[in-house]
Structures are given as C-alpha cells and as structure tokens.
Amino acid sequence: MPPTWTESARFVSLGPTRGSRKRPACPGARSFAGRAAINYVDKVSTPTLFLHGEKDQTSSTNQSTVFFDALQERGVPTRFIKFPRQKHGIREPRLLRIKMVEEIRWMQKHVRGEDWSPTERTE
C-alpha cells in the first residue's frame, strides 16, 4: 500500500540543501499531484460534508474549498463548515458539540432522508 501524503511529506525535499548536488525541486511531486482529490471530482456523487479547522496546516483550507466548489458546480449536495481557532481536529467543547450536531444532522438527512434537529436543552 502506498504511503499517504502526510506520511510521505516528512521525507520530501523542497529543493537542494546547502552543499548538496542539484536535485529536483520536489521529488515525488507528480505522485502527490496524481493522488489529489480534485482529480477525481467527476466521480463523486455522494453528499459531502466538509468540517475544517480555520488553522489546519495538515489539510489546507484552499484544497478543501476548491473541492467543495467543484462538487457544488456538479450539483452534489455539499456543505462546508469552518471552525474558528481550530487546527486539524476540533478541540473546543462548544465547537465539538456543533461539529457532532452537524454530523448527525447531515447523516439523518442524507442517509435516512429525515430532517433532524437536536433536542432543546432546558436548564
């Protein structure tokens, strides 16, 4: 099984290092580009929910928004939610609850065909 981009990225040289011989700017760049999700957008018909941390450095917001836009242009049911202050993974309890509610709402709608809202909390 080929390594994922994140596993391989640790070993990619972005250019010659001091004292090294001339090397390609990014070995394996073609391999990474070939695995980019945008290359397969024409095969996607599944409703897609994007949950993205505003400060995510693992998966760039730009890549997600390009894919989101491409799916929308194709008429695929799509929603993009960006969480403020979050990196790769939602950590703040309030935002984590919002994420879970949105995941359940999405699944209820696109798997069961039902509109769903969480029970209102009474204190």
Image (tube, rainbow, N blue to C red):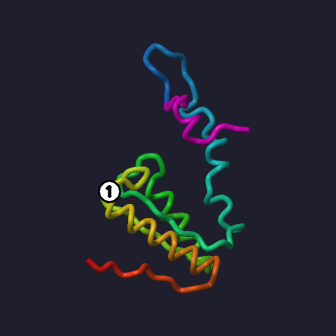
Choose between 102 and 33: the one closer to the eye. 102
Furthest-front residue in view? 123
Q: Amino acid at mark 1?
A: Glu
Q: Is residue 93 above or below residue 73?
A: above
Q: Specify whether residue 86 is painted magenta.
A: no
Q: Which residue is mark 1?
A: 92
Q: Quadrant of the C terminus?
A: bottom left
Q: Position of residue 41 (x, y in %)?
A: 65, 65
Q: Is residue 23 above or below residue 75?
A: above
Q: Position of residue 88 (x, y in %)?
A: 43, 50
Furthest-left residue in view? 123
Q: Which residues are magenta?
A: 1-14
Q: Specify whether residue 10 is painted magenta.
A: yes
Helix, strand or loop at label 1? It is loop
Choose between 100 and 65: the one closer to the eye. 100
Q: Position of residue 17 (x, y in %)?
A: 46, 21
